[in-house]
């Protein structure tokens, strides 16, 4: 593995977590934060009691209400919501701080690399909360769709342990993460996810091309099929060109957000950077996939003292 | 003695009038204190073929067309709306009738069966904890046409002989702008506050007969595929009906939580063709409704450009409404912004009504992404019950003339020939913001 790969990976990890933390620190909060606030508000404003009363009175059914609480004071609700949001921001900030600080700490104490699992867990929980919030198209697929984000941090924790066995596990974590992300994006593309359509319309518009619906749909179907093929390939074979292409394609799709929406959308790019970096990391690791292609497989171990 | 009696009568009358006035204002003030029981008793139980959950829907020519819809618990066989310009009286019914053109069952997803415990078969698990089945419900849509503009239409709903009380609504005037539109979004959670905001809407209409309709900016419920949430919203929507039977027609917008088929079943819209539409409120006011769940580009952008091109020279007030904000006060902008905003600028839209952010905001006038006195004011962003979020007032379009805040609210648009008064009305009836937007010269 190239000696600069791990430092670069650590930088990408910081950029990724920064992209995820930015909207939490300065905009609406994380998916987990929103879910917690909504759940709390539903309980505090007495929604469950209200629903139960309505269901009984109007529809002749019964709802099991576990705990009956009187409607809270609006000021108390606002204070608690504010505390939840502060907690949300605090967790995001801690994850960012941890991701930024660990590359330095791990030089001296490699076992601290396990702490990368905390931001990985934060990203995973946010993906699950996105699925539970169910407010976007294909939200239910958020956990596998975000696999490269949390998967890359898990892989980083393993790679920093600097032994062949953890490298092999990291190789499979990355391959499976890439497969999941590319498969879900391929499926969304094939199903003509509306934001994907707009990315094509807007990007084409930037270069003066008026894209017809027919061409847009055709392109997305093609992209969908190609992504699904790439998803299968990354776990099946170790092929350099394929992995290079995955890296390039991941970069193009990540960059399409700020290209379409303007530079303010940079966190969208930052969060998706692992879609490009994870396949390249698989390439640099050079370990085997399910089926071995001897000509392209080079098992290179991490050089000591690279981070 | 006679004088004394006359004095008593006059005093009683004065006392009654004062009591009535104070009752109205008490009602106004105590809106926030209404409890669950008193709110629930104002709604119609869904039972047999008793018409419940009534609404009048506008998505087209509000002077001459309307869809009158309701729900029954049983499918029934014959569903008719009796309507006319004259009231049918206490027991009678208006002269005209229209049998429902569209009847069907709402799409209901039943809860999953319980997971078997260790060593338990699925049948045993079902027996131990049988899932609560959600009762079916049926929609009925009567599309009435050839109405007279600016006219009060009385109507009675009838399903298999079961009749509702008499309601009425007013059609939009053929021309002129002497009316008011209420806009609000995001009623998706907070049942009690949702009900209170519905009562606030009714209060607005009660205190001012110029209030013509209610435009909903989307996110009616949390999960659009769950009928058990929609039925609550529909029953609670009854609260926007005035005590004298006046119904405010609703102009619907689809929010990101309103997934699935039920939205289209509730508002009698074609899923494939009626995702965006223009409601003509007479010849001088057009409300263009867009769908931020569908791609902004392609067919929607083509339709929008053609529609704005057609409407702009013809109408005094050109308004757009959609769910996800282009200039948000909380979140990032919708991906539709680079497609929609240049068209709004090009065709000089007068105001954009937004939702989704769960807050209040009024931007500075914006053109080409910059503050410009000739630009478009974006207002929103949803407070019909949902918990309110903290805004980012430091965004450039909310500073130096723009404004942002957090409270449950509706937006009231009073149309006049020369200007439009835009007011944010809070749950307690007070105004958070009150601005006038001048009419453009064409």
Image: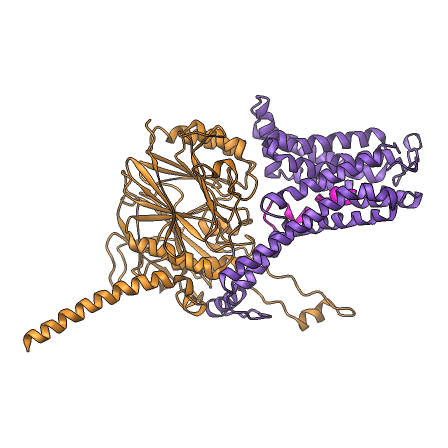
Chain colours: A purple, B orange
The magenta span reads A134-152
Q: Is residue B203 left or right of residue A83?
A: left
Residue located 53% across and 50% down the image: B389
Residue located 73% across and 33% down the image: A250
Residue B97 shown in magenta = no
Q: Is residue B349 left or right of residue B295?
A: left
Quadrant of the rendering where the C terminus of chain B is positioned = top left
Residue A108's spot in the image, x, y percent?
87, 44
Marker count (numbered) = 0
Relative depth, front residue between B25 and A244: B25
Query: Is residue B27 positioned above or below B280 on the image?
Result: below
Residue B353's spot in the image, x, y percent?
44, 41
Determine the residue located farthest toward the top in the rendered image. A208
Relative depth, front residue between A108 and B23: A108
Our reading of the magenta stretch's main secondary structure is helix
Determine the residue located farthest toward the bottom in the rendered image. B1
Query: Is residue B327 positioned above or below A71 on the image?
Result: above
Residue located 54% across and 44% down the image: B330
Residue B173's spot in the image, x, y percent?
28, 42
Q: Is residue B1 left or right of residue B440?
A: left
Query: Is residue A279 positioned above or below B66 on the image?
Result: above
Examine the rendering and report whether any part of residue B102 can be seen: no
Examine the rendering and report whether any part of residue A290 can be seen: yes
Quadrant of the rendering where the N terminus of chain B is positioned = bottom left
Residue B379's spot in the image, x, y percent?
44, 41
Residue A144 shown in magenta = yes
Query: Is residue B142 positioned above or below B9 on the image?
Result: above
């Amino acid at each position: 593995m190239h000696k600069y790969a791990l430092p670069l990976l650590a930088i990408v990890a910081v950029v990724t977590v920064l992209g995820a933390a930015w909207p939490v620190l300065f905009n609406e909060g994380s998916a987990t934060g929103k879910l917690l606030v909504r759940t709390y508000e539903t309980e505090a404003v007495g929604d469950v009691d209200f629903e139960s009363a309505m269901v009984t009175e109007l529809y002749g059914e019964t709802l099991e209400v576990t705990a009956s609480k009187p409607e809270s004071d609006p000021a108390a609700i606002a204070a608690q919501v504010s505390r939840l949001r502060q907690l949300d921001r605090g967790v995001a900030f801690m994850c960012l701080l941890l991701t930024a600080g660990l590359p330095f700490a791990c030089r001296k104490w490699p076992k601290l690399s396990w702490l990368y699992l905390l931001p990985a867990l934060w990203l995973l929980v946010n993906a699950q909360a996105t699925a539970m919030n169910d407010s976007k198209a294909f939200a239910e697929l958020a956990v596998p769709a975000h696999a490269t984000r949390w998967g890359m941090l898990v892989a980083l924790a393993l790679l920093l342990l600097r032994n062949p066995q953890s490298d092999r596990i990291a190789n499979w974590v990355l391959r499976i993460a890439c497969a999941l992300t590319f498969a879900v994006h391929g499926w969304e593309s094939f199903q003509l996810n509306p934001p994907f359509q707009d990315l094509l319309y807007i990007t084409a518009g930037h270069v003066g091309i008026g894209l017809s619906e027919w061409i847009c749909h055709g392109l997305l179907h093609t992209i969908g099929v190609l992504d699904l093929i790439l998803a299968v390939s990354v776990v099946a074979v170790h092929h350099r060109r394929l992995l290079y292409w995955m890296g390039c394609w991941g970069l193009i799709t990540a960059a399409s957000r700020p290209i379409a929406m303007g530079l303010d959308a940079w966190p969208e790019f930052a969060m998706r950077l692992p879609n490009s970096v994870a396949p390249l990391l698989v390439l640099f690791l050079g370990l085997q996939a399910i089926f071995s292609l001897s000509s392209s497989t080079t098992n290179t171990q991490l050089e000591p003292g690279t981070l | 003695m006679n004088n004394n009696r006359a004095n008593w009568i006059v005093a009683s009358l004065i006392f009654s009038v004062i009591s009535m006035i104070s009752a109205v204002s008490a009602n106004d003030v105590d809106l926030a204190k209404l409890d669950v029981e008193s709110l629930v008793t104002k709604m119609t139980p869904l039972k047999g073929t008793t018409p419940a959950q009534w609404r009048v829907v506008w998505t087209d020519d509000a002077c001459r067309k309307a869809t009158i819809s309701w729900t029954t618990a049983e499918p029934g066989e014959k569903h008719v709306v009796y309507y006319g310009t004259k009231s049918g009286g206490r027991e009678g019914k208006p002269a005209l009738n229209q049998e429902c053109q569209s009847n069907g069952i709402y799409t209901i997803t039943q809860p999953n069966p319980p997971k078997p415990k260790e060593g338990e078969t699925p049948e045993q698990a079902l027996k131990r904890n049988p899932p609560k089945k959600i009762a079916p419900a049926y929609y009925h849509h009567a599309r009435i046409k050839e109405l007279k503009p600016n006219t009060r239409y009385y109507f009675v709903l009838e399903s298999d002989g079961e009749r509702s009380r008499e309601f009425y609504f007013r059609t939009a005037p053929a021309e002129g702008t002497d009316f008011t539109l209420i806009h609000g979004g995001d009623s998706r959670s907070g049942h009690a506050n949702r009900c209170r905001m519905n009562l606030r809407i009714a209060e607005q209409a009660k205190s001012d007969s110029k209030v013509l309709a209610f435009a909903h900016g989307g996110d009616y419920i949390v999960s659009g595929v769950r009928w058990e949430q929609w039925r609550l919203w529909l029953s609670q929507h009854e609260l926007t009906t005035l005590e004298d039977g006046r119904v405010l027609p609703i102009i619907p917008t689809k929010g990101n939580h309103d997934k699935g088929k039920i939205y289209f079943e509730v508002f009698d819209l074609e899923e494939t063709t009626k995702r965006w539409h223009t409601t003509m409120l007479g010849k001088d006011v057009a409300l263009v409704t867009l769908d931020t769940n569908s791609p902004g580009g392609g067919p929607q952008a083509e339709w929008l450009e053609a529609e704005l091109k057609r409407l702009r020279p013809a109408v005094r007030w050109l308004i757009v409404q959609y769910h996800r904000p282009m200039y948000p006060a909380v979140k990032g902008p919708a991906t539709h912004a680079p497609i929609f905003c240049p068209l709004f600028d090009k065709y000089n839209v007068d105001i954009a009504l937004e939702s989704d952010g769960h807050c209040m905001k009024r931007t500075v006038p914006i053109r080409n992404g910059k503050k410009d006195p000739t630009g478009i004011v974006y207002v929103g962003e949803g407070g019909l019950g949902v918990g309110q979020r903290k805004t980012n007032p430091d965004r450039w379009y909310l500073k130096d003339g723009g404004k942002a805040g957090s409270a449950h609210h509706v937006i009231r648009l009073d149309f006049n020939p020369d200007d439009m008064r835009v007011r944010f009305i809070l749950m307690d009836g007070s105004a958070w913001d009150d601005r006038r937007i001048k009419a453009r010269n064409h």
